[in-house]
Image: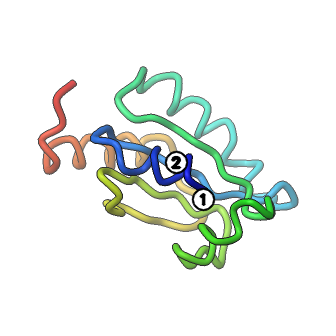
Amino acid sequence: MKDFDKIIWRNALTFVDFFAVWCGTCRAMTPVIDRFQKQMNGRADVYRMDIEDPDLLEIVRRYNIVSVPTLMFFRRGEVLWRESGRVDYEHLVNVLNELEKHEHVLL
């Protein structure tokens, strides 16, 4: 959990995919998340968190993760965007573009 807090409290935009291995929608999102991570080339750090990992129980509770996938962008510990369910690649790119504008992120 300490590592998670270190990750989200950085100045960089951080994207977190809360998923479960048994979740069909989560599995369907894997190629979208992989493409996003590769194509964004460091504009946002991407992490995947299995909600069934016992070490993540407190984080799952803290952020009230009740459905998967739940996708979130963080910066300096603040949740900037959150959405649950299936989203497409273009939507993620648009969200990142908007966050970069509003958060004055320097690339």
Amino acid type assigned to the residue bearing label 1 in the image: Arg
Q: Position of residue 49 (x, y in %)?
A: 66, 52
Quadrant of the drawing holding the C terminus? top left
At 45% across and 46% down in the image, what residue appears? 6
Tell me if residue 22 comes above or below residue 47 in the rendering: below
Q: Residue at x 36, y 50 (%)?
A: 9
Task: Return the residue nearer the eye: 92 or 80.
Answer: 80
Q: Which residue is mark 1?
A: 86
Packing grade of label 1 (10 A; few <14, some 14-19, many >=20) is some
Asked if labels 1 and 2 touch by Cβ distance under 8 angstroms, the answer is yes
Provide residue 43's location: percent of width, then percent of height. 35, 29
85 or 44: nearer the viewer: 44
Relative to 60, say whether 77 is above or below. Answer: above
Identified at 46% across, 58% down, the residue is: 72
**Quadrant of the image occupied by residue 19:** bottom right
Q: Give the left or right position of residue 62, taking residue 44 as reference.
A: right
Residue at left 42%, top 41%? 90
Q: Which residue is mark 2?
A: 88
Q: Is residue 30 above or below residue 5?
A: above
Question: In this rendering, would 64 be left or right of 69?
Answer: left
* As drawn, 85 above or below 36: below
Numbered mark located on residue 11 in the image = none
At label 2, which amino acid type do we have? Asp
